[in-house]
Amino acid sequence: MIERHFDINDPAFIADPYPLLEDFRENTPIFYDRQWEKVFFARYEDIAALLKDKRLGRQILHVMSREELGWSSPNPAQAPFDHFQSLHMLDREPPDHTRLKALVMKAFTPQRVESLRGKIEHIVNRLLDKVAPAGRMDIHHDLAEPLPVTVIAELLGVPEEHRHKLRPWSADIVKLYELGYTEEQVHQASKAVVEFSNFLRGLIDAAAARRANPQDDLITALVQVEEQGDKLTEEELIANCILLLNAGHEATVNGTSAGMLALFRNPEQLGMLAREAGATKNSPLFKTAIDELLRYDTPLPMFERWVLEDVEYKGVPLKRGMEVGLVYASGNRDPRRFERPDELVLTRKDNPHLTFGLGIHYCIGAPLARVEMQIAFETLLRRFPTIRLATDKVEYGAGFVIRGLKSLPAVF
C-alpha cells in the first residue's frame, strides 16, 4: 500500500485543504499514514462504498479486545467521555444501533422538525434585530453559533437561563474527535460530559415527574418512549441527548459561517441569492443552495471507521482492527462525481454530497440542519441584501475533523 503523511493539524492546510486533497484524490486516492495509523480514502466512489459497507463500523471493542488491538490500559481521565461514547447511537453497531436509533426517531420525528420552522424564523429575526442598528455583525458569533444552540435547546426543553452552558460543553467534548488531542483536552472533555450529564439528569427527572402534564419537548418525548415496551435507560437517554446537541449544531455552526464566506467570495452567486430572498419567501432555490454550500466547503471534513473483519478493497488489504479515514471534503470535490466540483453552483440539482454521511449512520439531524440554514440564509439576505465581508483575512480554528472559522465580520 502506498504510504504518505499529511499534517492534518497544519494551520495552512486547515485554512485551505483543497489543493492537497486534490493531490491525494488524483495521485494517491488510497494511502496509509504511518503516523496516524490509518488508511485514508479521498475519492467519492470509495468513501460512499465504505460508508455503506457493514464490515466497517464506528466502534471496534465489540469485536476485538484492547489486548488484541495492542492498546494500553484505558486513560482514567478519559473514562467519562468513553462511557458517553459507548452509549450513544452514533458509535454503536447493529443490533444496538438499530434499537437506539428507532427509539430516538420515535421522538425526533420529521413532523417535530418541520413544526420548528416558525420558531427558527423568530430566533433568526431576534438575533438580527440585535445587530441591525450597528450596521455590522460577526456572522459566526452573532448568528451561526447562537442559532442552532438555541434551536436544540428549545427542542430538548433546556430552560433559557441555562442555555449559555451548552456551546462550551459541546466545544470541549468534540475536541476529542480531532487527531492528536492533548491530555488537557481529555480532562476538559470528560469534565464537560460529567457536567452536561448531571444537568440533563435533572431535566429528565423533571420530565418524568410531569407524566400527568407532559411538556412538548424532546426530553419529555424520550422519557415517554422509555415507558414503552422497549426503552432507553437513563444513561442511554443522557448520552443521546448530548449527541443530539453536538451533532445537532456543530455542522450547522460551521456550515453557516463557511457558507457565507463562500458567498462573499462568489459575489455573483451571493447577488442571485439575495435577489431571490427579496422576491420570494421560502424559495426552493435556498434548498439547492444550502446543499451546494455544504458540498462546496464541508463543515465536518472527515469521519473515521473501524475495520470489523478482514476486507480486500480494490486490491488493498484492510485488516480487522485497522482504522480508515474517509475524507468527505475530498469526495465532495471529486470531478468523477460532480461537474465543475471546484465551482460554487447554487442551482446544482444532482448533488448527492457526503456531508451528512451515508448508510446506517446517516445523520439524523440532517433535516434540522437544512431547515435552520435555509431560514438563516434567506432571512439574513432578505433583511441585509447588501451585506459584505469586512475583513481581508479570515482565521480558522485548530481542528480539521470539525473545521470552522473563528469569526466572520461583515457590514451591511
Image (cartoon, rainbow, N blue to C red):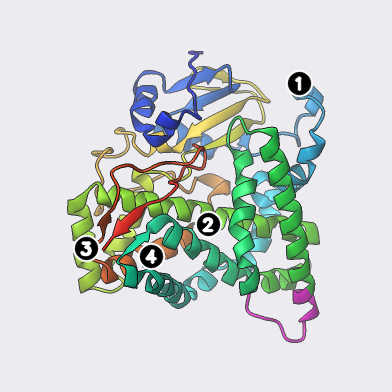
Circle 4 residue? 376
Circle 1 residue? 70
- Point out the tag, 3 or 2, that comes first from the N-terminus: 2
> What kind of residue is marked 2?
His
As drawn, the residue found furthest toward the front would be: 134
The answer to which of 158 and 134 lies nearer the viewer is 134
- Point out the tag, 2 or 4, that comes first from the N-terminus: 2
Residue under the image location 31 percent in, 71 percent down: 282
> What kind of residue is marked 3?
Thr
> Which region shows up in magenta?
206-217
Circle 3 residue? 386
- Point out the tag, 2 or 1, that comes first from the N-terminus: 1
Q: Is residue 332 left or right of residue 8?
A: left
- Which of the image's four quarters has the C terminus? bottom left
Circle 2 residue? 249
Residue 122's spot in the image, x, y percent?
A: 43, 77
| Marks 4 and 1, how far apart at CA | 47 Å
Residue under the image location 80 percent in, 79 percent down: 209
Residue 233's spot in the image, x, y percent?
A: 80, 60
| Marks 2 and 4, how far apart at CA | 13 Å
| Residue 211 painted magenta | yes
